[in-house]
Image: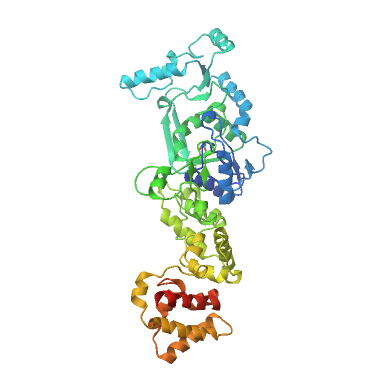
């Protein structure tokens, strides 16, 4: 493929970006980078009634967190084809509407929304399918095709409100090849003369989208399946303008984990997982929704999980970083059918990522968790502790949750272990051990282990006789990582004081 690939992500700022939207942005980005092309971010805010303050900022922040950085447009280089916010391009669209009007590919319509609603209701009452403004009905409506030229002119001059509609030809087969879905074919007899330009002087999504894609030199339109029904209209618009159209690729839906249908926020609430990349708080309603970032996801496994929902590399490989995804990505391996969302699998990706971090990277994560809770620690031990705890962790906060007893002495002792493992001679044995520990000059894992084993050998005791009660005394738990490592990171004084406390409480 040539290297002049140009794709765009064109969200409408109507609320937080759903993870399905993030996946659309990601596929565009991967495709662009794979082919050495450009990824643009354009904000489609023509529908002022659905505008939500803060949504644009949210989109930018969410994409940045994922590592998806636009080459051009909002958040990227903005010279050349800007502005990239459609509301700021308002003055530009009228010219294109006039162009279509001049060649009879569009017409002016004065019908009010009340009149249209009445017609729709009448059709419905008569049992007809959806009433459409089309090649048949337009002949009976108030528009520039039915009214005399002078009347149209006079109405406009008098300030009458009007829209501009596309004039679709009768019985024309609209055909295009979608990269993912193959050939799509729709007859114009089944299509609506959609509004291109609204009474408020704003273009509709359809017009602005096509004009902008053309002016911005977009070569591939990669977007969600919900836009597939609009694609034939878009094809007709390209034809009406006489412009070359981009390649279309409509992505499969993200489905609920447990049934048919699109994954919604309600499913996330019901099943206990977020459907947004980062936390969202609606400044207008005060409503909040949780995000993957705040839950403890790292950007890389989050992106990895999304990439594999609807695409597969054609190999067994599952774990990818962003660069690996760019290299492996192929639009032709995107599936037609919807992808079932799987939160557990997402957690697995995070876990894989966490476990692959180096000791010092894990230490940084643990430190963040400790600082957040205001707990004190010995910096020198953090790497060791975090590595030890990473075995059981999915999220960075688990590094602390799983090893909290390394920072705070146990307040309680596991009941089951206590009943099974704490005997009448346990206290005495632990006190003997403590006495030996006291004499170790250099309190390291190896020396502690030697002292412990020496004690067992001398007293001819099996490990099971001392080990579990020793662990219970120090950690309050029945299971966990190596006791010798635990002792080293706790330090001699702490070990001795925990043994003393356990002996006092457990008797
Ligand atoms: N503004 C549309 C959206 O919100 C863009 C659809 C497209 O990519 O053409 O998804």
In the displayed structure, does residue 135 sit left or right of residue 208? Answer: left
| Image spot of residue 74 (x, y percent) | 62, 40
Quadrant position of the C terminus in the picture: bottom left
In the displayed structure, does residue 208 sit left or right of residue 118? Answer: right
Residue 73 seen in the figure: yes
Which residue reaches farthest left?
A: 127
Count all numbered tags in the image, as a single digit: 0
Indicate how the structure is coloured in the image.
Answer: rainbow
Residue name at image x 39 percent, y 45 percent: 267
Which quarter of the picture shows residue 261? top left
Depth check: give the residue in front, 81 or 199.
Answer: 199
Residue name at image x 51 percent, y 62 percent: 354
Which residue reaches farthest bottom?
A: 458
Depth check: give the residue in front, 297 or 29.
Answer: 297
Depth check: give the residue in front, 417 or 132.
Answer: 417
| Image spot of residue 382 (x, y percent) | 57, 69
| Image spot of residue 132 (x, y percent) | 41, 22
With respect to residue 465, does 153 lie above or below? above
With respect to residue 363, does 458 lie above or below? below
Residue name at image x 67 percent, y 42 percent: 77
| Image spot of residue 407 (x, y percent) | 52, 68
With respect to residue 479, does 395 lie above or below? above
Which residue reaches farthest right?
A: 79
Residue 482 seen in the figure: no
In the displayed structure, does residue 33 sit left or right of residue 416? Answer: right
With respect to residue 171, does 469 lie above or below? below
Depth check: give the residue in front, 386 or 36.
Answer: 386
């Amino acid at each position: 493929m040539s290297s002049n690939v140009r794709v765009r992500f064109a969200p409408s700022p109507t609320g937080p970006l759903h993870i399905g939207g993030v996946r659309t942005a990601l596929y565009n980005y991967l495709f662009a980078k794979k082919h050495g092309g450009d990824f643009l971010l354009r904000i489609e805010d023509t529908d002022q009634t659905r505008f939500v303050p803060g949504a644009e900022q949210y989109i930018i922040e969410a994409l940045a967190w994922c590592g998806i950085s636009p080459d051009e447009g909002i958040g990227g280089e903005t010279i050349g084809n800007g502005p990239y916010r459609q509301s700021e391009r308002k003055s530009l669209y009228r010219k294109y509407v006039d162009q279509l009007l001049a060649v009879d590919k569009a017409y002016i319509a004065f019908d009010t929304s009340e009149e249209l609603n009445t017609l729709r209701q009448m059709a419905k009452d008569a049992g007809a399918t959806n009433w459409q403004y089309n090649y048949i009905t337009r002949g009976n409506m108030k528009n520039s095709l039915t009214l005399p030229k002078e009347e149209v002119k006079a109405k406009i001059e008098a300030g009458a409100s009007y829209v501009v509609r596309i004039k679709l030809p009768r019985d024309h087969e609209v055909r295009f090849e979608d990269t993912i879905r193959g050939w799509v074919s729709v007859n114009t007899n089944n299509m609506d003369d959609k509004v291109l330009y609204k009474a408020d002087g704003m273009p509709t999504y359809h017009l602005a989208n096509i004009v902008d894609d053309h002016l911005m030199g977009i070569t591939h339109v990669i977007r969600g399946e919900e836009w597939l029904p609009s694609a034939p209209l878009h094809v007709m618009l390209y034809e009406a303008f006489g412009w070359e159209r981009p390649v279309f690729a409509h992505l499969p839906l993200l489905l609920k984990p447990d049934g048919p249908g699109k994954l919604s926020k309600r499913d996330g609430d019901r099943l206990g997982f977020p459907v947004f990349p980062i936390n969202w708080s609606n400044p207008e309603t005060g409503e909040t929704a949780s995000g993957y970032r705040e839950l403890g996801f790292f950007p890389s496994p989050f992106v990895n999980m999304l990439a594999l929902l609807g695409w597969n590399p054609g190999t067994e490989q599952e774990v990818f970083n962003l660069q690996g995804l760019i290299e492996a990505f192929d639009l032709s391996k995107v599936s037609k059918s919807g992808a079932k969302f799987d939160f557990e699998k997402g957690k697995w990706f995070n876990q894989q990522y966490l476990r692959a971090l180096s000791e010092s990277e894990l230490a940084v994560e643990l430190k963040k968790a400790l600082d957040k809770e205001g707990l004190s620690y010995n910096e020198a031990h953090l790497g060791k502790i975090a590595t030890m705890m990473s075995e059981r962790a999915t999220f960075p906060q688990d590094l602390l949750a799983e090893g909290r007893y390394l920072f705070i002495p146990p307040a309680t002792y596991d009941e089951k272990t206590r009943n099974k493992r704490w005997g009448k001679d346990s206290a005495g044995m632990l006190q003997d051990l403590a006495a030996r520990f006291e004499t170790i000059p250099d309190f390291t894992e190896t020396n502690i282990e030697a002292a412990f084993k020496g004690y067992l050998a001398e007293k001819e005791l099996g490990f099971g006789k001392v080990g579990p009660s020793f662990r219970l005394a120090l950690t309050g738990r029945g299971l966990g990582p190596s006791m010798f490592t635990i002792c080293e990171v706790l330090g001699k004084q702490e070990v001795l004081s925990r043994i003393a406390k356990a002996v006092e409480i457990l008797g």
